[in-house]
Every structure is written in C-alpha cells, then in structure tokens.
Amino acid sequence: MNNKDDYKVNEEIRDALWKNADRGQDIFGEIKFRKNNKRIYFKALLKVILFMMIAALSGGITANYVISKGESQKNISGDLTQSKLEENNKAIYANSISDVIRKVSPTVVGISVKVEGVEGTPELSGSGIIFKSEGFIITNYHIIENATEINVKLSNYKVLKAKVIGTDAISDLAVIKVEASNLPVAKLGDSSKVNVGDLAIAIGNPIGEQFSGVVTSGIISALDRKINIVDKKTGEQTIYKVIQTDADINQGNSGGALCNINGEVIGVNSLKIGSASEVSGVSFAININVAKEIISDLMTYGKVIRPAIGIYGVPAISVGNNGIEGVYVQEVVSDSGADIAGIIPTDIITQVGGVGVKNMEELSNVLDKYKVAKSVHCNVQRNGKVKDVSIILSELKATNEP
C-alpha cells in the first residue's frame, strides 16, 4: 500500500474516532467520557429544594383559601352573623332564667302569719327558702316577728303549720320548720364569687292563688353595700353588709331567694333592709355566706351568739378629742365586761386585741373573731393617759331579747 492509500485509511480511522468521541465512547465503545458529577448533583439538589418550597407554599395558600371559603360560607348561611348571635344570646338569656325558675321555684315557699291582737284574715307576709329536706326553712325575721301562728304554703299548694327554730333580729333572719320530709332543697351558692353585673333573679312565692310565684330579674348592682337601719323601739343602729340589685324585691319575694344564673342562692331577699332606700330599682339581699353562719347558730342555739364588751360609742373624732382616733364611750352596759373592767363614759378605746379601731363597726369586726367569755386586751385613753385593760366578753343581746 502506498503512502496515499495509507493517508486515506488514517483519515477514515480519525473520523470514526471523533464520531465515537461525540457519542461519549472511544473506538472500542466501552469507555465513556465523564462530565463534572458534582455540578450535576448540586443542580439536581437545587431543583428538589425549589420544588419542595413551591409545593409547601402552594399547599399553604390552598389550605388558607379553603378555610376562608368555609368561614365565609358559614357567614353567608347566617350561622355567625351579628344578628344571629344577638338572637341566640337573647334566647340563651331567656332560657337560662326559665331554667333557674324551674330549678329554684319548688324550693321557695309562701309564709303567712297571725299576729297577736290582729283579728281577721292574715296578711300575705312573704317567702322562705327550704334548705333542708326535713322541712327547715330560712326566712326574714320581720316576716314572723310577733307571730302567734305561722302557715307555710309549698309549691304544690299544700299548706303546713310551722314552728320557730331560731331568730336573729340584727340580721333579719329566722329559721322555721314544717313537719315534712323529702322536700326539694335549694342549693346555697358562694356569694364571694358574685361579681357586679352578674344576672340576678329574685324568686318569691306569696300566699294567694293569683300571686303564686313572683319572679323579678336584673343584675348585681353592688357588693358589700352598707345599709344602716335604726330600730324604732330602741334607737339602736345596725349596719348591714348586703348585695344590691335592681331586681324588684317586694312583699311577695321578701324572704325568698336571690339566685345567680346557675340557680344557686346567693342572697336572702329582705324588704326591711330595702325599705331603707326610697330609690326605685334599688333592692337588697342578705349575703348568703353571712346567712350560712347565722343559720348554723340558729339551728344550734336558736339565736346568734355575738361577743360584746358592753358599751355604746361613737368615733372619737366626731366629738373632738385632740385628734385621737378610737371609739368614744358614751354609755357602759351595767354588769357587762366593760363595766366590770372599769371602763367609764368619756374613755376612748383605741385598740382591741392589738388592732386599732376607729368606730363601733371596726370594734365589732374585731370582736367577731373571739368567743363569748374570752378575755380581750384593750388600750384605753383616759385623761391623756393610756391604760391597758382586759375585758371579759359577754353576749350581745339582740333587740328582740329581754
């Protein structure tokens, strides 16, 4: 073979090599020409991450759209519109009062009395609350005051005679009892959990077919309201801490229940206390937590045993005593603890049991922590000198006691 032929063969071989090289193979077709693998993997990873981000973003947008669409459909259907909410709230309010009435009314009784020296048909006197199924009933003292006969009308219109278990003129509370069993019982609530603005429902059950079941409603207007009542017979002043409400308390539901939205009794209505105010829409009920303690004493002793030192006094600053704060003694009860300890009128009691006192209310609040017959230390100002006096506590007499 000549040189020209050799050159031609070599050209063909070279062309074949370039063609195979373009396909990534050598002339034997077994060895591949490799590209940069790291760069390929990095691009692939970026594509995966980008795809995942797009998918997540799309899913979030789609989910939000679905939820928003669902809520808007609810609004369109009227389930959550403002007008519908208002209608529902009104319905709940009305139904709640009805539920309370159904729950509490069977436990509220009507009370009528015969009073010594009064002839004819007894007047409608008020209401009471059954708190024990054996026939024990709490009511206002002024309802049964001076009664010679007490009749109780149950929610089923059955009338039973009642006897007095205990009375307390100071708190205007009393416990009476009828001979019965398995009576419906009111649930006494916790008045410390009551808030201003809470719904208040006053329930009474005066005697008389046409007035059977008196219900009024309103809100709690104020808590621990102090009402000063002056006894017309003795002139003694009593300060009541009561719940104020704008629910009307009248002859029918005095002595009845003031309830919360759960049907729990939070107060005992009192027309007597309410009569201290001549303002329309202002009524009062005795705090049920206070009433519970009084009921316990009435059930045990037939009266409330309150400790006293045996004085009548006024704030010292009201009579002008060189700025001395304390209780100015106006009168000392004969044979009382104060009398025996040597307390005299014009003395100023500044401390009781180590606690400063400025008036009779604060003095009484301190004494409530002690028991009758216990000794309490008092600081007394007399003629510019301080005396330390020990006083044996005696029992405070209510205005209905001799």
Image (cartoon, grey):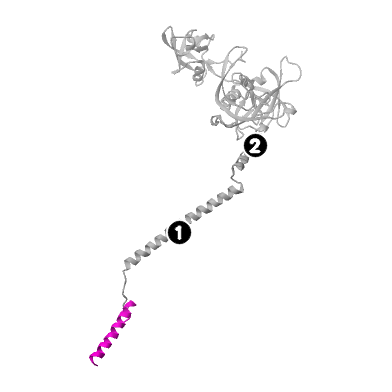
Give the residue at the far left of this rendering: 3
Quarter the N terminus occupies: bottom left
Q: Position of residue 135 (x, y in %)?
A: 66, 29
Whole-angstrom CA distance, mark 2 to mark 1, is: 52 Å
Judge left or right: residue 135 versus residue 334.
right
Q: Mark 1 points at which residue?
A: 55
Q: What amino acid is labelled 2 in the image?
A: Ala
Which of 332 and 161 lies nearest the eye of the viewer?
Answer: 332
Magenta part, dominant SS: helix
Q: Is residue 164 depicted above or below 76 in this figure?
A: above
Span shown in magenta? 1-30
Judge left or right: residue 288 versus residue 184.
left
Image point (32%, 66%), residue name: 38
Judge left or right: residue 155 versus residue 391.
right
Give the SS element for disc 1: helix
Please name which of the two marks, 2 or 1, marks the residue nearer to the observer: 1
Q: Position of residue 391 (x, y in %)?
A: 48, 13
Give the SS element for disc 2: helix
Specify whether residue 198 is in view.
yes
- Residue 156 position by quadrant: top right
Q: Magenta stretch: residue 17 in it?
A: yes
Please tell me how crowded label 2 is: few (under 14), some (14-19), or many (20+) other residues with Cα within 10 Å: few
Q: How many numbered marks have been drawn onto this rendered protein structure?
A: 2
Quarter the C terminus occupies: top right
Which of 238 and 86 lies nearest the eye of the viewer?
Answer: 86
Image point (24%, 90%), residue name: 4
Q: Mark 2 points at which residue?
A: 94
Give the residue at the far bottom of this rendering: 1
Q: What amino acid is labelled 1 in the image?
A: Ala
Give the residue at the far top of this rendering: 383
Q: Position of residue 339 (x, y in %)?
A: 51, 9
Give the residue at the far right of this rendering: 120
